[in-house]
Amino acid sequence: MKALITSGGRGTRLRPITHTKNKHLIPVANKPMLHYAIEAVRDAGVTEIGIIYSADSDEVPRRIGDGSAFGIPITHIAQDAPLGLAHVVKISESFIDGDSFIFYLGDNMIVGGVGRFVEEFERCGSNCHLTLAAVRDPERFGVPEMCDGRIIGIEEKPAAPKSKYAVAGIYLYDQSIFEAANAIAPSARGELEISDAHQWLIDHGKVVTYSEITGWWKDTGKPIDLLEANRLVLDHMPARVDGSIDEDTVVSGNVIIEAGASVRHSVLRGPCIIGAGTVVEDSFVGPFTSIAEDCHVRGSEIDYSIVLRGCQILDVGPRIEGSLLGDEVELVGAEGRPRVNRFMLSDQSRVEVA
């Protein structure tokens, strides 16, 4: 079995960070999201991975490489334009080359891996096996219509969903999916929708089965989803101290201090992770916070946040909470009188001021 993993898309809901960084390379618990997808399919027994990337940027192929770092061969497949997930399938037919495959959207995260879905697909002998998750907002996703435990229809982003389930971004296929992808027409938004391909399979008598995701699953398309994925991953990580913590620092819960990090005169309340080369001093780092490498946090408080590489958080008065800070962001407390707020923000930034 092979795997296709997506890494394209513009990440509009995660701007401004995605103006300069592919959203699939945003770290969750200090590891790029895309790594979780690669490791999940590798651990499920996949023998080769194809990663679809946007042809206008080589960031993903450059960062991921040929797969030697992951112990599995990786081929990078360029998509010239974002023409839909069924188009991704269509352009990958020569790579799949007659095998069955798992199609994994690279910004999805799931606990427990995907091996159980592979096993169920093979046990059922189906043409298509979908993963379903109960969600509060099914109108954001492809939604299945169910009858007597069978999927009888699928609608993309319906105004009036016919079930509480979303079709999650993990699918398994045999060669029938290429027939479907080549048969459907673009939707009103000009894309080949994967939901239309699934509906084509149903309409043409193909066997479409499913597994329900009973643990946690996240489509990390929005900042709050990214923060929740970070929380859930950190909650399952064991404590580890490879850096240094002085005797004046108070530590509680699962805390990970990566090699070269230094923590002084601070309070760390886990689960949290402090990246390599980062210095934390006279500060509070609260639960569900990831601070990446080479940051400096001084005289500040932060929790339930993701802080990317090279950030400076220095003498900030109010606690920072529920925040996503991009590479090399500087948050610095104002000095002198009158006390003022000064901002230098890129397009589509959002700031809440206490």
Image (spheres, grey):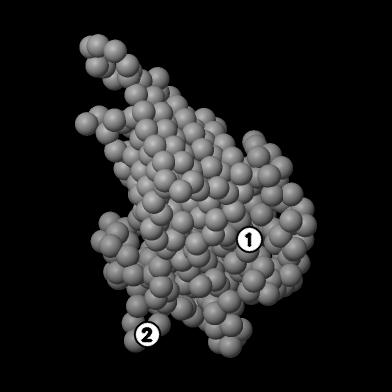
Where does the image place residue 123, in percent across and percent down from the top left?
A: 58, 88
- In the image shown, does 200 or 304 lie closer to the viewer? 304
In the image, farthest residue toward the top: 337
Residue drawn at x 32%, y 62% as measured from the top left: 138
Image quadrant containing the N terminus: bottom right
Task: State the residue at coordinates (39%, 61%).
Answer: 253
Residue 149: mark:
2
Tell me if residue 140 can be seen: yes
Q: What element carries label 1?
A: helix
Pointer 2: residues within 10 angstroms few (<14), some, or many (20+)?
few
Looking at this rendering, what residue extends furthest in the front direction? 247
Q: Is mark 2 on a helix, strand or loop?
A: loop
Residue type, numbered disc 2 = Gly
Mark 1 vs mark 2: give the one in front.
Answer: 1
Q: In this view, does 147 lie above or below 85?
A: below
- Residue 278 percent coordinates (x, y): 54, 39
Separation of residues labelled 1 and 2 (CA atoms): 31 Å
Tag 1: amino acid: Ile
**Dot 1 corresponds to which residue?**
38
- In-image side of 169 versus 87 (left or right): left
For image coordinates 29% across by 59% down, the residue present is: 137
